[in-house]
Amino acid sequence: MSIILFIIFILSVAAPSSVLAQSDSITLSSPFNFELLLSGNFGELRSNHFHAGIDFKTQGAVGRPILAPADGYVSRATVTAGGYGRAIYVTHDNGYMTVYGHLDSFLKPIAERVREQQYNDGYFAVDVSFEKDEYPVSCGDVIAFAGNSGYSFGPHLHFEVRANGGTQLVSPMRFYLERLTDTKPPRVQAVALTPREGEGVVEGGTSTVTRKVVHSSVRDTLRAWGRVGLSVQCDDIMDNTSNKYGVYSIELYVDDSLRFSSRMDGYALADTRLINAWSDYERFFERGEWFLRSYILENNPLPLLAADRNRGWIDVDEERIYNVKYRIADFHGNTTFCKFAIEGRRDSISQLCDSTAHYLYWFINNTIAYEGMRLDVPSGQLFANTTLAVQEQPSRYGMSRCYNLNSAVVPLRKEARISLQVNDTLGLDPSKYYICRVGKKGSAAVGGEYKDGWITANIPCLATYEVAVDTVPPAVKPIAPKNWGRNGQIVFSIGDKGRGIKTFKGLLDGKFILFEYSSKSGRLTCNMRREKVKRGKHRLQLTVTDNAGNTTTIEETVIY
Ligand SMILES: [Zn+2]
């Protein structure tokens, strides 16, 4: 290697660019007046997103007061059926914003503002913004009460730190390292070696080969030839808990030179789906296992990753042993090394010869048309050039042809567009048709618009799709109505088999009454005390509508 090339090589393995816009001297105090323990840390790998914050345990209870970690003001309150449930956003004088999810309740004046908005909208899910002078807070003030609302399965506080007007997620870990105890290093479970399509082989084949890691090493060598990429499965553990956490950094060395590194300092909110490019998506989708690539796909601009000029791909072009070393650290700096060998042995690299496959380039618009199906994959949506083998499958619903776009599901940065021709012999209302994704465990509604005999929908990945029809109204069932009066709570379970619940409305004696919806439990509840319902006999009417416009209305007598 010439000197100049060598210098370029060194520079290109520089540390990932920092997202920390604010000064390092800023501190945040504890949001609780008890010992901090985590049930989840920053950047953990979740389905289609990185964990945007850290999860503080709340002593197994709901209702613990949350204290402002710095001066500022409550700038936003939101209520949703899933996701963060009840949440507040605090804008701080120091330039950061903090977010609090899964709350049990708001402070009284904020609860009143939220309720006012819910009555104005006639719906429980709201997003309310506040001005700077409305709800100022000082460091240490109680700002809300922690809970288990939204998509939460046990009491905890989901806590985020954001910068750049809320668009950039910053690791909250660095503010709380001294309050958390972690003396245990990360653990490596397995490594995987993937041959690059048409350019490499592993163990004589074109498939990924996985090796278990035992006592930080891999017993057998991995035989390879040509261009190959490594992935790693790892996690972290901490003191005084039995939870598993994400790691902070991963470094890959081959023959002692750094080829790839990642550092979970932060990321842009808009980049969260790039987790599907960094991780082996197919592996997570099929087996629930997270393997993180130590090579960077062509259309993965995630700034927390860095690699050499080869984007981390390893060229095995000599018949010798390549010594591989992973250095994996947690947020506290505890470090694990994992060492193993790749044996370079000359082998024939098979070229692609499937003449029916489509070769899609990530940097151009791609269109594929089959009988009764058209697929548009816009430029920039694939994470890398992709070979697609489209196959027609037996249709489940008989409303259209069913197409499997590829045997392994292909993730997209945002979306592609599929159009399917509707088999229009039923003469149904066009709004009842929708595109669904067919999987092993059943089908999931994607939606879509009907026009001139075709239905078109945006799809988040290249999988199996066909048209289905939803003419069934939502199921609505009162839960123990005899107890409503005594408990002061009206409870229904609601569900929809086709396109899912869109909206609902409750009327008590003809007047709007607020129901809250939890997508986790599928239940609608109305707290009669909070709604100031008078004692006595009332007539309740509840209407639930699905996304295909099917409606169920039921009437019940409420004795309170
Ligand atoms: Zn969380």
Image (cartoon, rainbow, N blue to C red):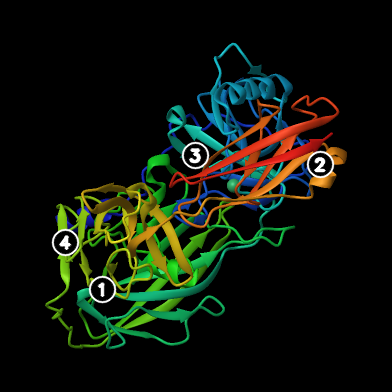
Q: Kindly identify which residue carries mark 2.
A: 484
Q: Kindly identify which residue carries mark 3.
A: 170
Comparing 72 with 450, the one in front is 450
* Residue at left offset 75%, top offset 34%: 527
Provide residue 206's location: percent of width, then percent of height.
27, 81
Q: Give the amino acid at mark 4.
A: Ile
Q: Which mark is residue 392?
A: 1
- Compare marks 1 and 2 and give the one earlier in the sequence: 1
Q: Is residue 120 left or right of residue 437?
A: right
**Does the residue at mark 3 contact the one at mark 4 (Cβ under 8 Å)?**
no
Provide residue 464's location: percent of width, then percent of height.
33, 66
Q: CA distance from mark 3 to mark 2?
A: 45 Å
Provide residue 488's location: percent of width, then percent of height.
82, 36
Q: Kindly identify which residue carries mark 4.
A: 368
* Residue at left offset 50%, top offset 24%: 95
Quarter of the image holding residue 436? bottom left
Q: CA distance from mark 1 to mark 4?
A: 14 Å
Q: Is residue 250 left or right of residue 258?
A: right
Comparing 10 with 402, the one in front is 402
Provide residue 211's location: percent of width, then percent of height.
45, 81
In the image, residue 85 sits, relative to residue 143, either above or below, namely below
Q: CA distance from mark 1 to mark 3?
A: 45 Å
- Compare marks 3 and 4 and give the one earlier in the sequence: 3
Badge 3 marks a residue whose secondary structure is strand
Q: Give the amino acid at mark 3.
A: Val
